[in-house]
C-alpha cells in the first residue's frame, strides 16, 4: 500500500497579445500533479504469478484540475483564460498474470480499467488533453539468457473511448449559462493508444 502526495509546481506564466497586436497582461496558471493512493496484492506459484492493483488519483482536489470554466478578471468579466480542466478523481483497477511454465520464457498478460476524468461539461476545456481511455490491455514476454541477461518486450493497447459535449465561449456566459455553452454545438474527443516497449537487462 502506498501514498504519493501532491507534487507542487511553480505557476505557469503565459504571455499573449490582443487581436490588435498590443500586449495583453500576463496570465498565470497553477497546475500540480495529483496525489495517489495505491493498494495491491499478489500471489506467486511455481507456474504463475497473479497481481491485482487499485489506485485512486485525486484530480478533483488538485490545482489545475479542480476548477472549471473561465477565469474571471478583477473587473468581473471573463478574461478568456481557462480556470482549469475540471476533471473528476478517478479509480483505476489493474490485473496481471505471468505464466512461468516455459523455461527462460515467462509470458505476461494484463488488463487495466479506469473511470473517465472528463465529463460532457468539460470536454471543450480538455480538448488539448483528451485522457478518455477507460480500458487497456497489455501483453509481454521475456527471454532469459544464462541467468544474467534478459530481453523484454511489451505491447500495450488502449481501446478507443470518446466523450462528447458542447463548445464553450466566454462571451456567452450568463446567469443560466455559466460555462458559455454554444447552443446546438458539439465537440467530441476520442483517443486510443498503441505502445511497444523493448528492453535489455543485466543482473549483477
Image (cartoon, rainbow, N blue to C red):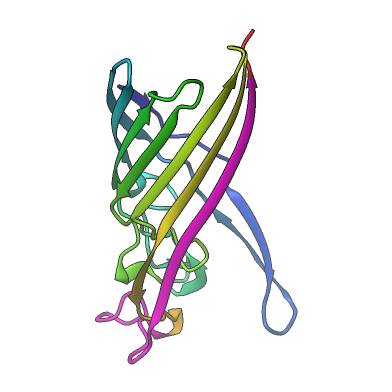
Q: Position of residue 147 (x, y in %)?
A: 58, 12
Question: Which of 198 and 132 lies nearest the eye of the viewer?
Answer: 198
- Horizontal relation, residue 57 to residue 150: left or right: left
Asked whether 18 falls inside the magenta stretch, the response is no
Q: Which residues are magenta?
A: 172-201
Regarding residue 138, the answer to whether it shows in the image is: yes
Regarding residue 125, the answer to whether it shows in the image is: no
Q: Position of residue 21 (x, y in %)?
A: 75, 80
Q: Residue at 47% of width from left, 20% of height from top?
A: 103
Question: Which of 130 and 47 lies nearest the eye of the viewer?
Answer: 47
Quarter the C terminus occupies: top right
Q: Residue at 41% of width from left, 40% of height from top?
A: 34
Q: Residue at 57% of width from left, 47% of height from top?
A: 196
Q: Residue at 40% of width from left, 76% of height from top?
A: 188
Q: Quadrant of residue 16?
A: bottom right
Q: Position of residue 50 (x, y in %)?
A: 29, 27
Question: Which of 59 and 177 lies nearest the eye of the viewer?
Answer: 59
Q: What is the tally of numbered marks visible in this picture?
A: 0
- Horizontal relation, residue 168 to residue 113: left or right: right
Quarter the N terminus occupies: top left
- Vertically, is 78 above or below 156? below
Q: Position of residue 28 (x, y in %)?
A: 57, 55
Q: Residue furthest bottom?
A: 184
Question: Which of 113 and 126 lies nearest the eye of the viewer?
Answer: 113
Q: Quadrant of residue 199?
A: top right
Amino acid at each position: 500500500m502506498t501514498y504519493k502526495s501532491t507534487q507542487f509546481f511553480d505557476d505557469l506564466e503565459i504571455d499573449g497579445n490582443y487581436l490588435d497586436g498590443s500586449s495583453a497582461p500576463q496570465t498565470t496558471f497553477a497546475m500540480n500533479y495529483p496525489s495517489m493512493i495505491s493498494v495491491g496484492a499478489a500471489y506467486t506459484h511455481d507456474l504463475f504469478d497473479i497481481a491485482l492493483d487499485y489506485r485512486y488519483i485525486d484530480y478533483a482536489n488538485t490545482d489545475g484540475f479542480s476548477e472549471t470554466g473561465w477565469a474571471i478578471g478583477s473587473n468581473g468579466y471573463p478574461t478568456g483564460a481557462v480556470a482549469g480542466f475540471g476533471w473528476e478523481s478517478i479509480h483505476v483497477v489493474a490485473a496481471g498474470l505471468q505464466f512461468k511454465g516455459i523455461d527462460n520464457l515467462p509470458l505476461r498478460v494484463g488488463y487495466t480499467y479506469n473511470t473517465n476524468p472528463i465529463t460532457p461539461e468539460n470536454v471543450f476545456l480538455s480538448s488539448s488533453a483528451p485522457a478518455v481511455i477507460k480500458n487497456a490491455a497489455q501483453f509481454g514476454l521475456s527471454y532469459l539468457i544464462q541467468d544474467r541477461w534478459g530481453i523484454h518486450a511489451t505491447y500495450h493497447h488502449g481501446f478507443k473511448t470518446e466523450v462528447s459535449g458542447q463548445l464553450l465561449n466566454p462571451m456567452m456566459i450568463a446567469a443560466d449559462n455559466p460555462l458559455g455553452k454554444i447552443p446546438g454545438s458539439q465537440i467530441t474527443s476520442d483517443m486510443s493508444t498503441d505502445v511497444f516497449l523493448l528492453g535489455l537487462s543485466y543482473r549483477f
